[in-house]
Image (cartoon, helix red, strand yellow):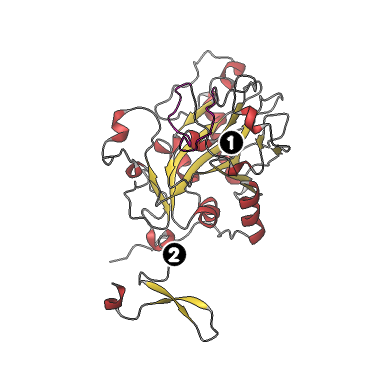
Amino acid sequence: MVSAEAPTRSHEPYQVRVEEYKSFRRDGYLVVRGLVAPEEAREWADFTDDMMAGRRAMPGLPSPPDDATDAERRQFYDRIHMPHRTCEVAERFLLHPRIVDVLEALIGPDILGLQTMLFFKQPGQGGQGFHQDTYYIPTQPDTLIGAWMAIDPADEENGCLWMTPGSQHEPIYPDCDGVTQQGDTILSDIEAVKSVSHPDVELNTLAQVALQYEVEVPIVAEPGDVVFFGGHVFHRSHRNRSDRPRRAFVSHYCNARSRIAWDHGSNKAHYEGADANGATNHRHILARGSTHLPYAQPKFGTLCAANAPEIYGERIDDNRVKSMMGDSAGFMVLVPHVDVEHDH
């Protein structure tokens, strides 16, 4: 009988440098150049080209009509929400080991994959005004982070991301127009906003807060570059004014020990199995580490902590309880308990 080969890691690990870690804490975002190989990013470019041409379909979504012109096909799609639940390619990029390596250093060690979006942003298609991602996806404790991967070269002309450094220290502003019930309303003097994400800064009143910052940075990116940004950071993008596409694949994650009372859409089936307070952790994939909370398995079998804990699971050397003790040099260090009976 031939035994099955043990699964192995598919990519060279990425180790976050101290300066990168400090940059993320200082600015609220981090750009990692070339994190994903350009030829991997090209897979998404080919996939979306095939979708617009009608050669390939995303399950559950319509395709352009057979008699559509090339221009009509290019404008048929704007963005697709949660493709990882129906598309193997999207699941694979949500759980890309090098992306999760960075997440492990920034918010880990335990990482839960929550959400994906595929942006087409063809010439002429609009951007998204100032917003904070935690406004839409709450986590408790608050550990949300986004990972935005460029599929095409992105610049100011074709509608790149713009980040507001330092705005990660802002609270989440609640709205007054019923879009969401999120927001740090526990703060006594916080003001409600309206029309969040609208590109018009006169209508989107969050812009009044965001534009008080002196610096807003355009994130010029090449295919395979990944932008990591916290859920409180003010960010936006503008209309694609070029004759080139600006496609991107975006994923959101949180620490796997955070409680999630969110799922995309209002379908009641999404909330089946939720706890008494509506937590939906069981719908989201454990990408790295471990957790005491429920989690989902990847539908298409992409290797991650959920199905390959021997590769991507617990990072601690053992599960023994540890205590802070003085070493021979007088420094306090973590020392595992020798006997199990001392663990109580």
Q: Is residue 242 above or below residue 27?
A: above
User: In terms of secondary structure, where does tag 1 sit?
Assistant: strand
Magenta region, mostly helix, strand or loop? loop
Q: Residue at x 47, y 33 (%)?
A: 136
- Rendered location of residue 23, percent (x, y): 66, 52
Q: Is 63 in front, or is 198?
A: 198
Q: Depth check: give the residue in front, 241 or 130.
A: 130
What's the residue at 38%, 71% (across, down)? Answer: 318
Q: Is residue 104 above or below residue 43?
A: below
The residue lying at 28 percent from left, 72 percent from top is: 344
Q: Which residues are magenta?
A: 177-194
Res. 303 visible in picture: no
Instruction: Tell me where residue 53 sits by quadrant.
Output: top right
Residue type of the residue flagged with mark 1: Ala
What residue is at 30 percent from the left and 77 percent from the top? 342
Residue 302's label in the rendered image is none
295 or 136: nearer the eye? 136
The residue pinned by badge 2 equals 315
Q: Single out the residue that lies furthest toward the front.
A: 188
Between the C-alphas of marks 2 and 1, the distance is 31 Å
Q: Which image quarter: residue 196? A: top right
**Residue under numbered circle 1:** 248
